[in-house]
Image: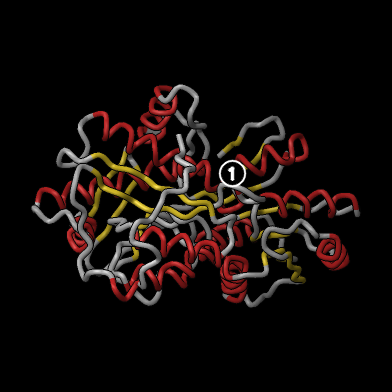
Amino acid sequence: MINRRRFSIATGLAAVAGFPAVRAQSGGKIVLGQSAALTGPAAQLGIQYAQGAQLVFDQVNAQGGVDHRLIELRTLDDGYEPDRCLDNTRKLLAADALALFGYVGTPTSLAALPLATQAKTPFVAPFTGAMALREPFNKYAFHVRASYQDETALIVKQLTQLGLDRIAVFYQNDAYGKAGLDGVTLALSKQGRKPVALATVERNSVDVAAAAKTLRAAEPQAIVQISAYTSCAALIRAARKLGYGGQFFNVSFVGTQALSDALGKEAAGIVVSQVMPSPYSSASPLARSFAEAVKAAGGNARANFSSIEGYLAAKVLVDGLRRASAAKNLNSEGLVAGLESLGAQSYGGFAIKLSASDHVGSSFVDLSMLTGDGRIRM
């Protein structure tokens, strides 16, 4: 269950520069801080990711925690707005969070990472594939998912194989949308092409009427969408009302289950790239263990791509904590060393590889299709 309480900060909003060089926690808890959308048009992304992660933390705590210390995930709502995320991050750092974990979104993560870096606090498994968070290399940033460049490269490859070369892009007018647009543009440029049309939407908005008209007028064969589920669903409906009959492709951050729920029967045929294995597949050991954890939680979590990502990310983080504990170094620098020492690991058949020189754990990408009856096919 997500803890939505706002906790008090006895030390106030201390300046990040005043934090100790090595962050350690005393007492019986390992406090992790998360800023994510729990309300607003992107709420399902934050809720689902945090629920998946909490499944792992609950399991670990039921077994006595890490080094007899229980893990507490403190999640603050930022509504998918960078300014609120900054405020949350200052609060979490002032509360001496050992690590910042599972931040949701590109603009919010980009706002928070400099604070985490200055405070020498690990920033682990943000729910974003933006290259700006991966390059240049940052000692404190760790990723478990593929990049948006990986996702858009596969989307463009699939469209090309289908013989679709008139491709338009609908993107959120912020760092997330532009990261996805850059990926599509790069993939197309390698084929000597470029998007036939571009249209934008503001973050946390569903005002897509102008965008739909722009895209419809260009007569693209496919539209690649780089936005959250509410605006993508609105664009799909608006474009179809204008008579558009082409294909829609989305990157994983759209929130696959949320998009399917928002569109209902209208979701049939929509394609979404995925950076996690299907949470519904009995063929995946990771998905099977995840399904068992969801069942054991008794309705406090729902199986979907966002929650299984939180589940995997939490497993990676816990392994890093255990290695830090084994080295008698359960603090911020110890966690960095613990994560870097993981090397190549298999999490129920899903490969993660981290090292001192590479903090991007996976480049796995696959495609899924919505059916319109709530199911998702890989």
**Residue at image mark 1:** 44
- List x then y, in percent, for residue 268: 73, 39
Asked whether, in this view, residue 23 is left or right of residue 277, the answer is left
Q: Which residue lies furthest to the right in this view?
A: 242
Instruction: Tell me what residue is drawn at x 37 percent, y 45 percent.
Output: 73
Q: Residues within 10 Å of mark 1 (few under 14, many from 20)?
A: many
Asked whether, in this view, residue 206 is left or right of residue 20, the answer is right
Instruction: Tell me what residue is drawn at x 79 percent, y 53 percent.
Output: 246
Foreground residue among 127 and 114 = 114
Quadrant of the snapshot with the C terminus? top right
Q: Which colour scheme is used?
A: secondary structure
Asked whether, in this view, residue 241 is left or right of residue 44, the answer is right
- List x then y, in percent, for residue 218: 84, 68
Quadrant of the snapshot with the N terminus? top left
- Relative to 223, residue 318 above or below: above
Residue type, numbered disc 1 = Gln
Indicate the quadrant where residue 199 lies: bottom right
- Relative to 283, residue 344 above or below: below
Circle 1: element type: helix
Residue 190 visible in the picture: yes
Foreground residue among 350 and 324 = 324
Foreground residue among 271 and 59 = 59
